[in-house]
Image (tube, rainbow, N blue to C red):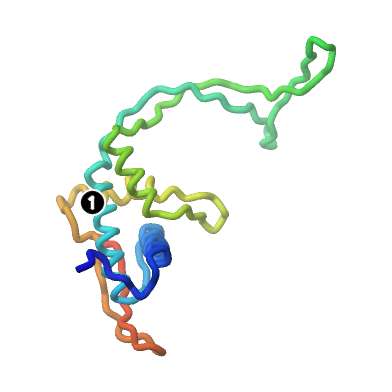
Amino acid sequence: MAWQRKLGRPTDQRKAILRNLVTSLIQYERIETTEARAKEIKAIADSLISLAVKECDNFTTKQVKVSSAVLDSKGKKITKSKKSKNDNSYDVVEREESTEMKPVDSPSRLSARRKMISWLYKVKDQNGKNINLANKLMDEIGPRYKEKNRTSGFVRMYRMGPRRGDAAEMVILELIKD
């Protein structure tokens, strides 16, 4: 017996559908799909969230030097004119250095993050900025369920009835809020 439903698709299409639906579930925390797909997604999402719960606090912080451009009041970079050895002039952006505390993943957290990234597509918000869903899992969703002492059962299915047209059983899949 196969460990996964075939969903009537070739392997590459099936994996793409599952990745897309898991990505949407993590991004929006609620999706509507068919029952067979939902059962597959639920297992995948539960394993990713349990990884996030297990590894959400497993990091250290490190002091890092950061160099950034100096900006004027309008938000433009300030430049200086310099001369080269050949007496050519060119513009150089003024920079300032500061130190920041950055989180550094432990090896097991890095491995968990890579496993999450293998299941999640890159997505953008309405403004066109990239959203890192692995960070969302580690920083928002993982700590939310850490206090509940759960190992699974992070996703809930609600049946909606048959879909009009092909009578496929439809469900709403959502992350549990409590």
Residue furthest to the top in view is 85
Examine the rendered structure and indicate whether residue 33 appears above or below residue 151: below
The picture quadrant where one finds residue 69 is top right
Q: Residues within 10 Å of mark 1 (few under 14, many from 20)?
A: many
The image position of residue 63, as x and y in percent, is 40, 22
Q: Nearer the viewer, residue 26 or 139?
A: 26
Determine whether, in the image, residue 3 is placed left or right of residue 69: left
**According to the image, label 1 marks what residue?**
50
**Near-viewer residue (31 or 4):** 4
Where is residue 175? Give x, y as percent: 29, 62
Location of residue 65 with respect to 122 vertically, above or below: above
Q: Position of residue 4 (x, y in %)?
A: 26, 66
Quarter of the image that includes the N terminus: bottom left
Q: Is residue 147 above or below residue 86?
A: below
Q: Residue at x 36, y 61 (%)?
A: 22
Residue at x 34% of width, y 28% of height: 61
Residue 28 at least partly seen: no
Q: Quadrant of residue 68?
A: top right
